[in-house]
Amino acid sequence: MSYRTKCILLLIISSLPVNFSSAQESTPENQKLTPIQEVQSFTLSEGLTASVVTSEPDVSQPLSIEFDDRGRMWVLQYLQYPIPNGLKGS
């Protein structure tokens, strides 16, 4: 399976409903899971796998994800959301 296919599957899988009950029961509310722990808590259908491609602090507030002809993933970030530079919040 190509890298691009794996990334696309990860994006599709991340949009599917997942049973998080076991992770919520075993993790105190004030303790955050690492990205790898989050993926390990997923309940996926047989034959599907999920892996971490990137996470914070490498990517913050992703707005768009694209793949080029070489299978590289490009992520557009909007670091000034919700208050763009120079504007004041209400």
Image (spheres, helix red, strand yellow):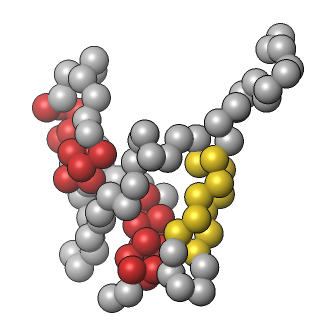
Tell how many labels: 0
Instruction: Locate residue 9, reporting x and y percent.
Output: 42, 73
Q: Can residue 21 be seen in this view?
A: no
Instruction: Locate residue 31, reporting x and y percent.
Output: 24, 23
Please name whichever residue, 25 or 14, is drawn nearer the observer in this view of the structure. 14
Instruction: Locate residue 66, reporting x and y percent.
Output: 62, 69
Q: Residue placed at 83% from the left, 14% from the top?
A: 88
Quadrant (top left, top right, bottom left, bottom right) of the N terminus: bottom left
Q: Residue placed at 65% from the left, 54% from the top?
A: 76
Q: Which residue lies furthest to the left in this view?
A: 26
Give left or right: position of 83 versus 30: right
Q: Residue placed at 59% from the left, 48% from the top?
A: 62
Quadrant (top left, top right, bottom left, bottom right) of the C terminus: top right
Q: Residue placed at 27% from the left, 53% from the top?
A: 39
Q: Is residue 26 above or below residue 38?
A: above
Residue 29 sits in quarter? top left
Q: In this view, does 47 lie above or below 11?
A: below
